[in-house]
Image (spheres, grey):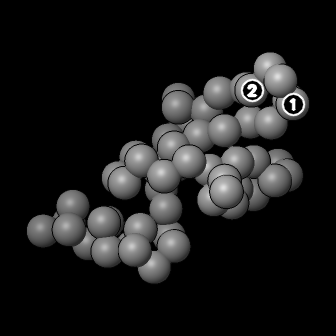
Amino acid sequence: MSNLLRRLGCMVGKHHRSRRLARLDPRDGQIFSQCTHCGVQMKRVSKGNWTVAR
């Protein structure tokens, strides 16, 4: 049941980022990560702030 609630959180934009999935894009220096529940790509905006990469 808790996994279903986590996926529902992703549907309303509350993604969960795993620290070990963060990686650096060498082309432009951006740091990217993925949501552990739905796999959407996220980009680091500033220290501690992440947004969905588009």
Q: Does 16 sit above or below residue 27?
A: below
Residue 5 image offset from top left, x and y in percent: 26, 72
Callout 1–callout 2 Cβ contact below 8 Å = yes
Residue pictured at 87% horizontal, 30% vertical: 28
Relative to 32, 45 lies left or right: right
Residue pictured at 85% horizontal, 52% vertical: 46
Residue 9 image offset from top left, x and y in percent: 39, 73
| Residue toward you, 27 or 47 | 27
What kind of residue is marked 1?
Asp
Secondary element type, mark 1? loop
Secondary element type, mark 2? loop
Task: Quadrant for the N terminus, please.
Answer: bottom left
Residue sticking out furthest to the left: 1
What kind of residue is marked 2?
Asp
Residue 25 disc label:
2
Residue 42 image offset from top left, x and y in percent: 62, 50
User: Which quadrant of the structure image shows residue 24?
Assistant: top right
Which residue is under mark 1? Answer: 28
Residue 54 image offset from top left, x and y in percent: 67, 57
Residue pictured at 80% horizontal, 36% vertical: 30
Residue 48 visible: no
